[in-house]
């Protein structure tokens, strides 16, 4: 997870791992990527290396538990 502080409204936001992976896939060879603040809408510059590091250290997504019959059980 990565916490980004908006340059305009100074509020912090945390993009999801899925958002980070989509942005990284589209940012090959660029010096900066733009992440939009969900509070004010301003695009913030972030280095792709910082995002790669955040994705690398992100916890793995938990798989839903299933019982013997193959039915999902609540966590």
Image: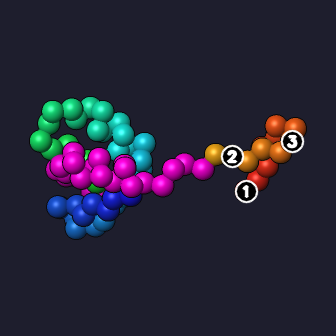
Q: Are marks 2 and 3 in contact (CB under 8 Å)?
A: no
Looking at the rendering, in which quadrant would you find the C terminus? Answer: bottom right
Mark 2 lies on a secondary structure that is loop
Magenta segment includes 42: yes
Locate residue 42, reporting x and y percent. 21, 52
Q: Which mark is residue 68?
A: 3
Look at the image and tell me whether residue 43 can be seen.
no
According to the image, label 1 marks what residue? 75
Locate residue 23, reporting x and y percent. 30, 39
- Mark with earlier residue (2, 1): 2
- Mark with earlier residue (3, 1): 3
Q: Are marks 3 and 1 in contact (CB under 8 Å)?
A: no
Q: Which residue extends farthest right?
A: 69
Locate residue 48, reporting x and y percent. 21, 45
Which portion, as a residue range, is magenta?
Answer: 39-62
Q: Quadrant of residue 10?
A: bottom left
Circle 2 residues within 10 Å: few <14, some 14–19, many ≥20: few
Q: Nearer the viewer, mark 2 or mark 3?
A: 3
Locate residue 63, reporting x and y percent. 64, 45
Side of 42 relative to 65 (left or right): left
Q: Are marks 2 and 1 in contact (CB under 8 Å)?
A: yes
Distance, label 3 to label 1, CA atoms, is 15 Å
Q: Which mark is residue 64?
A: 2
């Amino acid at each position: 997870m990565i916490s980004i502080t908006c340059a305009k409204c100074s509020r912090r936001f945390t993009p999801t791992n899925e958002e980070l992976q989509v942005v990284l896939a589209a940012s090959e060879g660029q010096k900066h990527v733009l992440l939009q603040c969900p509070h004010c809408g301003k695009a913030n510059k972030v280095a792709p290396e910082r995002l790669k590091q955040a994705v690398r250290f992100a916890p793995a997504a938990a798989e839903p538990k299933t019982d013997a019959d193959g039915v999902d059980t609540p966590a």
